[in-house]
Image (cartoon, grey):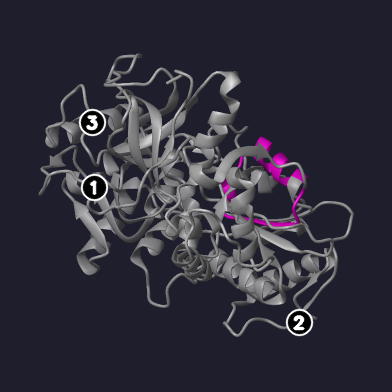
Amino acid sequence: MTLPALQFSDDQAVAWDTISDALAVSGVSLADETLTPPRDGAENVLAVIGKAGSGKTMLLAELYKSMRALGVDIVSGDWEGRKRKDRRTLAILAPTNKAASVLRTRGVPATTIHRILYTPVYDPEFEKVAEWLAGNGERPAIEGLTDVALDRAHASYQSHASVPAALAAAGLRGSDFITGWKRREEPLDIGFVDESSMLDEKQFEDLKEIFPTLLLFGDPAQLPPVQSSGGMVFESLPEKRVLELHRIHRQAEDNPILDLAHALADPAVDFYAFERMIEEAAGRDERVVWAPRVEADLMARSPVLVWRNATRIRLIHAFRAAYGAAVDELLEGEPLICDGIELPLKHRKKRLDLEARGLIKGAQVVYLGPGRRPGFSRLHVVGAEEPQVSAASIVKIEKEGEEEPFIPFAASMGATFLHGAAVTIHKAQGSQWDTVQVFGPDIYAASRMGRIEAGQPLWKRLAYVAVTRAERELRWVIRNRLGRPSEPLGTADLAARPAAPLELTGGDA
């Protein structure tokens, strides 16, 4: 069987062959370089599992490139052209915007699971533009859209293959061409799901209904979903349907962060030994830092990772105090975490609008300032392809020792947010940042409890997830101290693009 020119390890080559056989059963033959129409039959689910750096993303990317070269259409969730009987499709998914954006930075056009479950409804005039951009129609003549604007849209689509991004390049907002969202009615074809350790059983069942062929990529050493029964969805698959990768591939050179993560698998390594390893690594490699305090500057874009909620709340209040934030308002540039949507059932369409823009539970957001109406906020959704939105917001600042949070301002209903300067390690799963601060005293507290999860000490699972969130630099914080910020909080680091309003009409805001 033909493998890509890229050199695979033995376990990756075995995984490639097994996946190729499974795809061939569904009519996509990587070996013969042929496509045949989709076949009806039993569900075809495989899982590729492995720890951080084992080559899962490399394998996913090579499979995507090979399938695209064969003529398989990539479904992004932002636009789907006319149905063809013999069309073969691939959707590459992640549970969160941030996880999807990590794949996109590596050249893989990923979208969120939510954007596949719910599809956009386009204005008929702009459907013509979308069909033209996708190569399925003639260049349209649209009132108010000049030839120059169409040229900009075409150039953007050639670079990014995104219809919304192309129309935005033409000077349009999402509300100009998307009239609503609907639950997907027809199944798709092949789905790849990254960070599948985060999937709960309901999401897994939804995906199996949509994709006859489903390939899961996951890390068995991570923490299981909070609302799960304690396991990960790929653990329920037959053994022969699970392919495990072992060899580290992420970088050719030694990576001290990955070395620390993999050292946690050694039963002889206790918390004290692990901290000694961190301190020694910091002494010989600048990518690991033995940090005497938390740095406020980093918290604005990369949250401190903690285990305990009490620690999270204390750090958030310390962060706001360091920047001089008033108790009754937010500063531009403050980080937030979406905690869900508070809307009555009659506003189901508006809920879909908000979620489709990236405001799903767990989404990382930066506050850009107040909106035009009381209770509305201008927001930057981290990792979203169209990040700038304006939405009715309910912001909650939690207080230590009190059940009810303080609400500096709020619309009567809309997207709800918690502060995001610090987050629990559970919520950090699926995300990566250039530099990560891990609050060591919390990991120590977990080690003192002696809890075991899935045969592994809880503190080791927490440490593993926290450490592997760092792409370049790991800062292990050893004391409960906060360094003063070096400059005022701001938003200059975020791309300045016009916000697409998502307002409730009829006085509902």
Residue 257 is drawn in which quadrant?
bottom left
Q: CA distance from mark 1 to mark 3?
A: 13 Å
- What residue does disc 1 label? 491
Note whether residue 420 is visible: no
- State which mark lies toward you, 1 or 2: 1
Work out whether mark 2 precedes mark 3 in sequence or the reverse, and give the earlier one.
Answer: 2
Residue in the picture at 60% in, 35% down: 230
Q: Identify the amino acid type marked 3.
A: Leu
Q: Which mark is residue 330?
A: 3
- State which mark lies toward you, 2 or 3: 3
Q: Which mark is residue 132?
A: none
Does the magenta portion include 307? Answer: no
Work out whether mark 1 precedes mark 3 in sequence or the reverse, and give the earlier one.
Answer: 3
Does the magenta portion include 196? Answer: yes
In this view, the residue in front, 258 or 350, is: 350
Residue 242: percent from left, percent from top: 70, 57
- Badge 3 crowding class, 10 Å Cα cut-off, few under 14, some 14 to 19, many 20 or more, is some
- What residue does disc 2 label? 1
The correct choice, above or below, for 423 with respect to 28 in the image is: above
Residue 12: percent from left, percent from top: 63, 72
Residue 83 is drawn in which quadrant?
bottom right
Span highlighted in magenta in the image: 187-209
Residue in the picture at 60% in, 33% down: 228
Q: Identify the amino acid type marked 2.
A: Met
